[in-house]
Amino acid sequence: MKRLVILGGGYGGLKILMNLISNNLPDDVHITVVDRNPYHSLKTEFYTIAAGTIADRDVRMEFPTDAQVNYEYGEIEKIDIDNQQILMKESSDAIDYDYLVLGLGCEDNYHGVEGAQEFTESVQTFGKARSAGLAIGNLQAYGKVTIVGAGLSGIEVASEVRESRPDLNIRLLDRGASVLKAFDSKIQEYVEEWFAKNDVDVIHHSNVEYVERDGVCNNGVCYLNDVTIWTAGVRPNYLVRELSFEKDEQEKVILNDYYQVPTHPQVYVVGDCASSYHSPSAQLAGQQGEQIAEVLGSVLKGEEPRKPAEIKLKGTLGSLGKSDGFGNMMQQPVTGRLPRLAKSGVLWLSKRH
């Protein structure tokens, strides 16, 4: 029996699983999926949980069932590469593997800022998004919320919280000269104007020095604050960072053309832990998952895998509340209702699939 273990049931891990079981998985293969939650969650929508605009049951889906697949739910203690085992915190029984997929995603990067980890909320996991939603939902009228980081996550959190709670005082701390530095200037200007019209205070050239329970200190100015949400960057999951594999400057594992660790070809990496020219995203993880499933499908059948083609992303979509948005569509910057509708359509297709 060939034992394949997939760590993480996110976009990449789930895509690998679904493609394998839908394409004549050999009878001598058994798959174990390990995840902290007993469901797949749509991480791109965690900002709605934080803002309280959608129930959490609307952004989670059941894992597929199959006779050759079983699930282990809980926290991982250690990935033992030398002995090809996964050690769990809640169990003394190790999970053995012949082939391993690392799809554990990312976690917040606090950049060494004092108090950031202790005193901020997050949208990086389902549990943390729920915590953020509870903190914001419990605020009294005219409470103060600060979002640190003006990338895609920060923009969506800030705009969704504004739409959810018009009474709150919302501040967005942006390290750069403009929000969404990775996007076209047309999109940057549109989003800046949206925040100005909707009374969200954007502070550029920010440099958060430290965070306290009731405030954020930025460039020598300390703002009193009720809730602080950290969206200022991510790094690969610590379990993967601990491994002795060669990594790039972002601490992501460097792979060969088949998504394999060169020194351990039985180990595959997908998503936020895999070194890539592209920025991390659900779309990227999904496409990588499709290609890894093809490679693994051949390997598990004893065949020579084909080299995966170059990944071509279809663009990025973001929301500004429920009826406005932005994004790159057909290599063109688009703003307004159309990209918001497109994002809703992508979410609908994900749930239906």
Image (cartoon, helix red, strand yellow):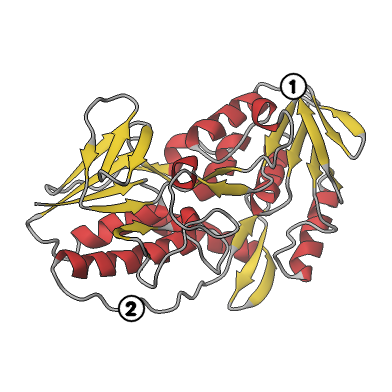
Q: Mark 1 points at which residue?
A: 213
Badge 2: residue crowd in 10 Å (few <14, some 14–19, many ≥20): few
Q: Which one is nearer the viewer's eye here, 312 or 80?
A: 80
- Where is residue 271? Give x, y as percent: 45, 57
The residue that appears at 49% across and 46% down in the rendered structure is: 241
| Label located before the other in sequence (1 or 2) | 1
Is 101 left or right of 128, judged from the image as shown? Answer: left
- Where is residue 216? Give x, y as percent: 81, 31
Q: Quadrant of residue 140?
A: top right
Is 143 left or right of 136, judged from the image as shown? Answer: right
Q: Which one is nearer the viewer's eye here, 195 or 32?
A: 32
Is 185 left or right of 236, judged from the image as shown? Answer: right
Q: Mark 2 points at which residue?
A: 307
Disc 2 residue type (three-letter): Lys
Asked if disc 1 and disc 2 are in contact, CB closer than 8 Å, the reply is no
Is 6 left or right of 60, judged from the image as shown? Answer: left
The residue that appears at 40% across and 65% down in the rendered structure is: 288
Looking at the rendered structure, the number of numbered marks drawn on it comes to 2
Q: Is residue 353 visible?
A: no
* Residue occupying the far right of the picture: 220
SS at mark 1 in the image: loop
Disc 1 residue type (three-letter): Arg
The residue that appears at 78% across and 69% down in the rendered structure is: 185
Q: Quadrant of residue 24?
A: bottom left
The residue that appears at 59% across and 56% down in the rendered structure is: 250
Q: In which quarter of the image is residue 302?
A: bottom left
Q: Is residue 290 visible?
A: yes
Distance between the alpha carbons at the discs numbered 1 and 2: 51 Å
- Where is residue 33? Give x, y as percent: 27, 44
